[in-house]
Amino acid sequence: MTIIQAIALGVIQGLTEFLPVSSSGHLVLFQHLFGLRQPELIFDVAVHLGTLAAVCIYFYHDLIRMITALAKWVFGRNRKAGLKNPPADVWLALMILAGTVPTAIIGLCFHKIADVLFSSVLLVGGMLVGTGIWMWFTRYKTGTGKDVSGLSLMRAVLIGIAQGVAVIPGVSRSGATIAAALYLGLNRETAARYSFLLSIPAILGAALVGLPESASAGSAGSPAVLAGAVCAAAVGYAALSFLVYLVKKGHLSLFAPYCWAVGGIVLMLAW
């Protein structure tokens, strides 16, 4: 992989990891375009760590509040309140944990057939069309809804399932989870916030799964890998900021036509 290819794929990863157009689907398409028949695992891990850095920086204050509140709740006097009335930041942290469980189970199951999934351009096209349909109907959701206090265990698990399904190339993680949160009655700000905080353990988990094999392959410090990771982080932060703004305005459905267009073209060419 050349540096130019790595930069291009890093930019694509940074854009599509957070914009609701499927990062895995676009990476499959562009890897075919560049003639990279199999993705380089070390590069895949590096760009995921780049986007992980982006979301952690963006939600830095949320993460600090949750960690601090959770520590006080577990080790301090606040633990006496139990699960019946935990502080808001503690409850959010617990719901992120609850949503991560189904994501991890689904992700591990699909990991066994990852080679098949990531080799099918036809699958990518079909899933992009489905992602567009899933997001389109969010336009009918009003800005009102429940905040973090209304994030129940059932809602967290269902959103976690939506995130787990997004392991399929062509299914957008952010599109699936934000739309699911809106359909389940959360308000726009909470839907976006929970979706991206929930992505942190998912992205970290995906990187850790591939880390042992990628470490044995070497080349972790190659200029191409580093360039891809830096581009993924910088572009990812900008894309995340942009999408949060659009979701708060109720414009998630704007990405549906793009998914339909790309998915339709892919289906026609791959059929």
Image (cartoon, grey):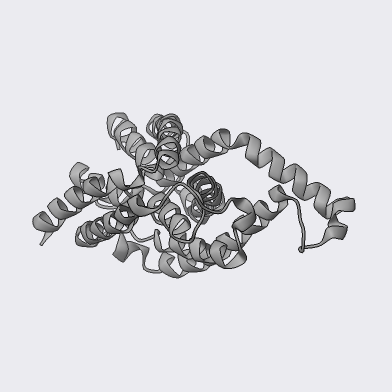
User: In this picture, is 79 found above or below 34?
Assistant: below
Identified at 56% across, 61% down, the residue is: 99
Residue 242, located in which quarter of the rendered image? top left
Front residue (pair 159, 24): 159
- Image quadrant for the C terminus? bottom left
- Residue 178 seen anywhere in this rendered image of the structure: yes
Percent x, y of residue 115: 33, 62
- Please identify the quarter of the rendering in which residue 97 is found: bottom right
The residue drawn where x is 40% and y is 53% is 141
Q: Position of residue 109 (x, y in %)?
A: 45, 70
Total numbered badges shown on the rendered structure: 0
| Residue situated in front as seen by the camera: 41 or 53 | 53
Snapshot quadrant of residue 226: top left
- Image quarter of the N terminus: top left
269 sits to left or right of 215 = left
Which of the two residues, 11 or 64, is positioned nearer the viewer here?
64
On the question of residue 170 being in view, the answer is no
Q: Position of residue 40 (x, y in %)?
A: 36, 47
- Could you tell me which residue is drawn at 32 percent across and 56 percent down? 137
Front residue (pair 103, 130): 130
Image position of 193 (left or right of 252): right
Q: Position of residue 260 (x, y in %)?
A: 20, 52
